[in-house]
Image (cartoon, rainbow, N blue to C red):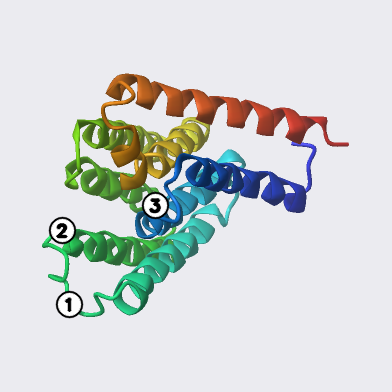
Amino acid sequence: PCCSRFERRILSIVHALVGTVICASAGVIPKFWNTYLGHIGPAAVMFIISELERFPGPNTVVTQGWTAILGGLGYISYDLIFSGCHLDMHCESLREQQHIAINTFLVCIGIDMVVHRSRYSAAMIGAGFALFVGLHPQPNPMGLLIHRACAAMLIVYAAARLCSRFDVCSRSLYYASYLFFYGQNGFMMIFDKRIDDTAYVLYVLCLATLMQTLTELIDYACR
């Protein structure tokens, strides 16, 4: 790419800003503020790891490992300290344990990636998160569909990571981050029965593709 690292980071932040504006416009925030925070964090981790897959180097796995560690610890800290549940994993339902478990898993895998620099460990991020996303209870069929589409992308990432297909890794994880972010409960409750489930998932993929194309055009246009 022609853009510097700083410019590329600015372009990356634009994705989060656009998503936040869409959330505000649709009425997701502030009404569903908690689920917004619960989705933008993991989506950001997936997005950062996908960016690191674009131009892999000798320290890519280590950087991804630290990203997983910090992301997992950040989510656990929020869940245990700021969410109101603290150490009570039954304050909402038993599924709260899934949130703690998947982020503990990310921390453990991240540590292993930093220590061993293993492709298998990197692939386990995709496989483990796919298991969580695909089986996590959802409020309606639209939520189930978009989360399973996200899980499918994560499985593609895991398989591609084992084969060192970094181009596939980057794109599949990028799409997974979009599907996960726009699969938050706020959107599911607002658009349920108003937009066809399959159409909604395709609209999200269209948005992801347009944003990716625009980002790459700007990236390569920088001199």
Dot 2 or dot 3: first in sequence order is 3
Q: Mark 1 points at which residue?
A: 88
Q: Name the residue under label 3.
A: 39
**Quick one: 62 or 140, which is closer to the camera?**
140
Q: In this view, does 72 lie to the left or right of 193?
A: right
Q: State which quadrant residue 90 falls in.
A: bottom left
Q: Do the residues labelled 2 and 3 touch (CB within 8 Å)?
A: no
Residue drawn at (42%, 66%), measured in percent from left and top? 69
Please say whether residue 195 is visible from this viewpoint: yes
- Look at the numbered disc 1 and give the secondary structure of its residue: loop
Residue drawn at (68%, 51%), measured in percent from left and top? 9
Q: What residue type is labelled 2?
A: Arg
**Quick one: 125 or 41, which is closer to the camera?**
41
Q: Mark 2 points at which residue?
A: 95
**Which quarter of the figure is the C terminus placed in?**
top right
Pointer 2: residues within 10 angstroms few (<14), some, or many (20+)?
few
Image position of 117 with respect to 206: above or below:
below
* Mark-to-mark CA distance, 2 and 3: 15 Å
**Quick one: 3 or 193, which is closer to the camera?**
193
- Look at the numbered disc 2 and give the secondary structure of its residue: loop
Dot 3 or dot 1: first in sequence order is 3
Q: In this view, does 95 lie to the left or right of 53?
A: left
Q: State which quadrant residue 161 falls in.
A: top left
Question: Percent position (x, y) of residue 28?
Answer: 42, 47
